[in-house]
Image: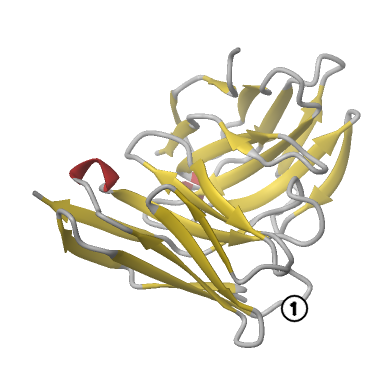
């Protein structure tokens, strides 16, 4: 059972454009939603995370939008740069941030110069 | 401040063999989680160790076992290796209220 569904699988965006990645979850007990960035040959690195008590969180060029009623959340990468080319994963966990993470399938983002 | 470290970086084994992977958590972290990431997929949770006990476990068979030492480092053991066990094995440290930080992973190839 895939509890976190991520789309699209891949994305090509021009430098300076906006990358948008969407995730939907099924388990209403989830209450912590992080996004991770992974480069080839590396482990995932935390980008930004949100809890359901807020609808949006922004850190630099990265913004999470959260819709609790629709059980959806998304990552927006503003002013995309070639260095942002990586695979992005949404995840969800229940309770504390250190608990078991359930990951989406990933989105491969390519930013063209 | 060293982050999460894992060893070895790469490993090649034959079907039926056993393998042990190692992880040292980020300084100050007492909880270690292990994830399996198949090629082109998201990481899948294997289990989590805290105070030398397995605290949570994902949907993995008993061939996957682990251990945590008093210094918080951890080992992942996989017995009777199958071709399908080929994957990147990730260790993450940080539990409770702490965000999980991932190591670089160990790439396991089973032939």
Residue in front for this viewpoint, A84 or A88: A84
Q: How crowded is mark 1: few (under 14 residues within 10 Å), some or many (20 or more)?
A: few
Residue A30, quarter of the rendered image: bottom right
In the image, is B77 to the left or to the right of B48?
A: left
Q: Is residue B91 above or below residue A47?
A: above
Q: Is residue A41 above or below residue B58?
A: above
Q: Which residue is drawn at 48% across and 29% down?
A: B104
Q: Residue at x 47, y 36 (%)?
A: A43
Q: Quadrant of the N terminus of chain B?
A: top right
Q: How is the image coloured?
A: secondary structure
Return the x and y of residue A95 as percentages of the image width and height. 82, 58
Q: Residue at x 62, y 74 (%)?
A: A3
Q: In this view, does A25 lie above or below A86?
A: below
In the image, is A54 to the left or to the right of A17?
A: right
Task: State the SS at label 1.
Answer: loop
The number of numbered badges drawn on the structure is: 1
Q: Is residue A89 above or below residue B63?
A: below
Q: Quadrant of the C terminus of chain B?
A: top left
Q: Which chain carries label 1?
A: A
Q: Which residue lies furthest to the bottom in this view?
A: A70
Residue in front for this viewpoint, A89 or A66: A66
Return the x and y of residue A101 as percentages of the image width and height. 66, 55
Residue B20, quarter of the rendered image: top right
Return the x and y of residue A52 as percentages of the image width and height. 70, 69
Residue in front for this viewpoint, A46 or A100: A46
In the image, is A30 to the left or to the right of A60?
A: right
Q: Which residue is drawn at 71% across and 77% down?
A: A27
Return the x and y of residue B61 as percentages of the image width and height. 71, 53
Residue for badge 1: A28
């Amino acid at each position: 059972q895939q509890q976190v569904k991520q789309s699209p699988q891949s994305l090509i965006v021009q430098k300076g454009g906006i990358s948008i990645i969407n995730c939907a979850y099924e388990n209403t007990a989830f209450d912590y939603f992080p996004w991770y960035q992974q480069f080839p040959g590396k482990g995932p690195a935390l980008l930004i995370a949100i809890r359901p008590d807020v609808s949006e969180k922004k850190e630099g060029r990265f913004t999470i939008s959260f819709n609790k009623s629709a059980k959806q959340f998304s990552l927006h990468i503003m002013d995309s740069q070639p260095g942002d080319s990586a695979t992005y994963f949404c995840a969800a966990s229940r309770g504390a941030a250190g608990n078991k993470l359930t990951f989406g399938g990933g989105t491969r983002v390519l930013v063209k110069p | 401040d060293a982050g999460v470290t894992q060893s070895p970086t790469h490993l090649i084994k034959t079907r039926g063999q056993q393998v042990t992977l190692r992880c040292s958590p980020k300084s100050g972290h007492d909880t270690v989680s292990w994830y399996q990431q198949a090629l082109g997929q998201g990481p899948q949770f294997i289990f989590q160790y805290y105070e030398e006990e397995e605290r949570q476990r994902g949907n993995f068979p008993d061939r996957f076992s682990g251990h945590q030492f008093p210094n918080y480092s951890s080992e992942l053991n996989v017995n009777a290796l199958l071709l399908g066990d080929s994957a990147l094995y990730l260790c993450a440290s940080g539990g409770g209220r702490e965000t999980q930080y991932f190591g670089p992973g160990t790439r396991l190839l089973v032939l």
